[in-house]
Amino acid sequence: MERRDAIRALATAMSGTTIALAGCSGNGGGDGVDIEQNVEYAAEQDEYVELSDITEEATQVNGSGGVAVSGVAENTSDNSAYIELVMTFVDSEGTTLGETSAFPKGSTSPNEPGEAAEFEAAIAESPENIAEYTIEVRAT
């Protein structure tokens, strides 16, 4: 019976965290945990890729608390492009907590001109420790 109570308590705690992050889109809109979002483009690549529908959500990564970032990347150029999104997470003091990356179509398939593809990446870091993150957009 104690094990069942512990599982129920953990599920309740994680539900509260998920709700706190679910509405957060990098603009301070979350209740409780607030993660600021920044988007940077490598070498004028803002002409080639547009990001939209970016969300953060509490999740489990390798059995511990984490944060998943998802959204849509669109190739706005006239050429096929391999798109990589590198996310760097930092705490309130500016210390880097970790990095992860996502390829909207996978690392072996380019995004065709005008094509939009979903992406998702997760980091095994407690949402409460993350103050902000940056998405660096790279397209080749």
Image (spheres, helix red, strand yellow):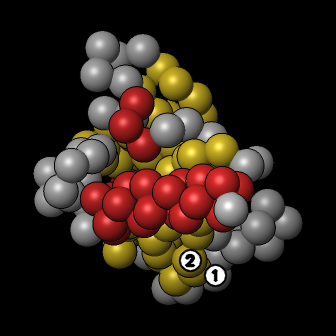
Q: Position of residue 59 (x, y in %)?
A: 56, 59
Give the x, y percent position of residue 68.
53, 57
Indicate left or right for 79 with 131 as reference: right
- Quick one: label 2, few (<14), some, or many (20+) residues within 10 Å? some
Q: Which residue is mark 2?
A: 118
Task: Give coordinates of residue 105: x percent, y percent.
Answer: 70, 73
Q: Which residue ends up furthest to the front in the rendered image?
A: 1
Say if 130 sits above or below 60 in the image. above
Q: Which mark is residue 112?
A: 1
Tag 2 secondary structure: strand
Q: Tag 1, which secondary structure? A: loop
* Distance between the alpha carbons at the discs numbered 2 and 1: 14 Å
26 relative to 74 in the view: left or right: left
Q: What residue is at 43 percent from the left and 55 percent from the top?
A: 13
Q: Residue furthest right?
A: 108
Q: Residue at x 37, y 24 (%)?
A: 91
State the residue in front, 100 or 32: 32
Does label 2 or label 1 sit earlier along the sequence? 1
Please give the name of the residue rendered at 63% of the width and 81% of the height, measured from the top-left corner.
Answer: 112
* Residue type, numbered disc 1: Glu
Q: Position of residue 65 (x, y in %)?
A: 57, 46
Q: Is residue 100 visible?
A: no
Between residue 55 and residue 78, name the one nearer to us.
55
Quarter of the image with the C terminus is: bottom right
Q: Nearer the viewer, residue 57 or 104?
A: 57
